[in-house]
Image: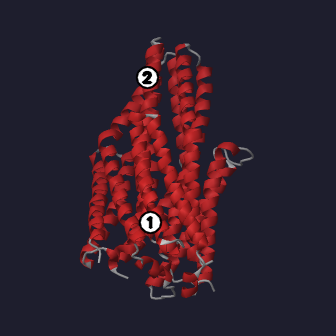
């Protein structure tokens, strides 16, 4: 088996296991609490507004927005790591069909794997830090995966 | 039946069930549910204006139930299809698992058991609730769903151990999988090329959505909820109602973009996976080509018209549903071909023993 296929297959299988374990952890220990928290914040915001206490209503609305921001990213990360890992495994099975030298294929495999790890990582880091670094990481990761996909499509088009 | 054929059959069946479920969910639950959520939000806004906190509590409890109903249906649809893909992938890479056929079958059965248990349990969450549960937040349906996930993880670890042994030099494999990978038929090549292009289109749409709309939508989400409460406090009910309608439109716009992004990528993945099981589809070349073309047409129609729902409304929604039906029809055709397959390839590889 070529090094590029080995990297994609092992990397993809490790990533799918990681994505499933992450989903299992999230469903068991965090999702219900997140959903309960979002609902409670929204009820508090509207209740305080009915009591004409707008300071607390605004604070509860901010809490809701923060919880929803985190919830959306947790779900996104689980689905993107899972989806990208499936793509890596599929490519791992057929990468030798690409009409490129093994050296080029290896670079493409490295780019695909690194992008597939970095993109969701950048997304989930935004929960802890809403600065530029996690966003840059997410953009870099998604750019790497998309660019590599263009080359993979080209490689399949000129397959041997 | 060999482990590979079991995984292929199970995978396509899971995808088919997931898609039929998705169509039923979209038509009968998704749209009526969105209207009910909007109505409850409107009532909650009126309760704010009427200074009635107890009514707010009641309306949000109802919204919570409606959202749980929606969320568990989406989760069921997504997980059953994803497990279908994983099943096909595991079938595809069987040559690299240095395991005895009996062990492969056991891991495959365990995988499929988990792949059925998780979505069925997730579907039941809304109906079972916390009845007889020993926990405060998690009900029995959630516990069995997690057990299903655990079974899938254990089965994947079992297969991973086979890959590890393969890489360590134990080449106890069949030649069947390699034959699948070498298939160069028209159906295989078309599905491969079409699938890669669909995934690429999905990536580009996802990047566009994330870059142009995502942050804006998140800001608008909280701002509109705040506006509902503030306008109700000010006694301006028509303006508060307008904010509720805008919130509904925003949720619709978000859902449409996410659905288009995920469906086009999913169909691309499915096309690539189906490319490799064409040797198992026991149909004439003409029928194979027919199902491939129908599958690819449906794969483009569904996400494109889902996106057009923002401009064309229900007409586009109806055409998108037709796209989904085309994909279901093509998958059923391929599944029939799989059922007609007599096991010749398994016999060649010795996997049936």
Q: Quadrant of residue B25?
A: top right
x and y, in percent, of residue B113 in the image: 64, 65
Nearer to us in this view, B47 or B114: B114
Chain where mark 2 sits: B
x and y, in percent, of residue B115 in the image: 60, 62
Q: Which mark is residue B243?
A: 2
Q: Quadrant of the C terminus of chain B?
A: bottom right
In the rendered structure, the answer to whether residue A26 lies left or right of residue B65 reads left
Q: B317 above or below A54?
A: below
Residue at the extreme right = B132
Q: How many marks?
A: 2
x and y, in percent, of residue A68 in the image: 46, 39
Rounded to the nearest whole Å, what is the CA distance between mark 2 and mark 1? 50 Å
Q: Which residue is mark 1?
A: B289
Nearer to us in this view, A132 or B315: B315
Which residue does the image show at 37% across and 33% down from the upper left? B219
Callout 2: SS: helix
Chain where mark 1 sits: B
Q: Earlier in the sequence, mark 2 or mark 1?
A: 2
Sort mark 1 into few (<14), some (14-19) or many (20+) by Cα contacts within 10 Å. Answer: some
In the rendered structure, the answer to whether residue A106 lies left or right of residue B243 reads left
Which residue does the image show at 43% across and 60% down from the upper left? B293
Which residue does the image show at 33% across and 75% down from the upper left? A97
């Amino acid at each position: 088996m070529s090094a590029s296929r080995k990297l994609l297959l092992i990397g993809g299988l490790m990533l799918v296991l990681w994505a499933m374990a992450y989903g299992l952890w999230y469903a068991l220990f965090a999702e219900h609490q997140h959903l309960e928290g979002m609902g409670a914040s929204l009820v508090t915001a509207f209740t305080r507004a009915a009591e004409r206490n707008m300071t607390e209503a605004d604070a509860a609305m901010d809490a809701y927005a923060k919880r929803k921001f985190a919830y959306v990213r947790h779900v996104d990360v689980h689905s993107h790591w899972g989806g990208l890992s499936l793509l890596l495994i599929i490519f791992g099975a057929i990468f030798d069909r690409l009409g490129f030298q093994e050296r080029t294929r290896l670079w493409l495999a490295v780019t695909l794997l690194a992008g597939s790890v970095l993109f969701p990582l950048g997304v989930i880091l935004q929960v802890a830090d809403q600065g530029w670094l996690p966003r840059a990481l997410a953009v870099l990761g998604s750019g790497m995966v998309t660019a590599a996909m263009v080359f993979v499509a080209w490689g399949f088009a000129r397959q041997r | 039946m060999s482990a590979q054929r079991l995984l292929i059959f199970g995978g396509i069946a899971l995808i088919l069930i997931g898609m039929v479920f998705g169509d039923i969910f979209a038509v009968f639950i998704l749209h009526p549910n969105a209207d009910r959520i909007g109505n409850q939000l409107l009532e909650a806004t009126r309760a704010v204006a009427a200074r009635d906190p107890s009514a707010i509590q009641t309306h949000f409890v109802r919204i919570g139930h409606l959202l749980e109903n929606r969320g568990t249906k989406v989760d069921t649809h997504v997980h059953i299809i994803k497990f279908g893909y994983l099943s096909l992938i595991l079938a595809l890479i069987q040559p690299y698992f240095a395991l005895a056929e009996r062990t492969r079958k056991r891991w495959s059965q365990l995988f499929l058991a988990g792949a059925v248990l998780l979505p069925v349990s997730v579907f039941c969450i809304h109906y079972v609730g916390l009845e007889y549960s020993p926990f405060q937040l998690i009900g029995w349906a959630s516990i069995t769903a997690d057990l299903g996930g655990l079974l899938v993880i254990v089965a994947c670890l079992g297969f991973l151990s086979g890959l590890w042994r393969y890489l360590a030099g134990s080449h106890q494999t069949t030649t069947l999988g390699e034959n699948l990978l070498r298939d160069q038929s028209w159906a295989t090549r078309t599905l491969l090329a079409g699938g890669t292009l669909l995934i690429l289109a999905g990536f580009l749409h996802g990047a566009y959505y994330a870059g142009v709309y995502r942050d804006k939508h998140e800001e608008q989400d909280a701002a509109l909820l705040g506006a509902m409460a503030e306008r109700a406090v000010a006694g301006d009910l028509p303006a508060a109602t307008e904010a509720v309608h805008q919130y509904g439109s925003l949720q619709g716009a978000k859902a449409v973009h996410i659905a288009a992004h995920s469906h086009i990528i999913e169909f691309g993945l499915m096309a690539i996976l189906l490319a490799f099981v064409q040797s198992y589809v026991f149909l004439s070349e003409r029928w194979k080509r027919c199902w491939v073309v129908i599958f690819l047409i449906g794969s483009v129609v569904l996400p494109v018209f889902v996106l057009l729902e923002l401009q064309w409304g229900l007409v586009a929604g109806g055409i998108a549903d037709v796209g989904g039906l085309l994909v279901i029809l093509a998958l059923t055709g391929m599944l029939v071909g799989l059922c007609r397959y007599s096991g010749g390839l398994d016999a060649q590889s010795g996997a049936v023993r």
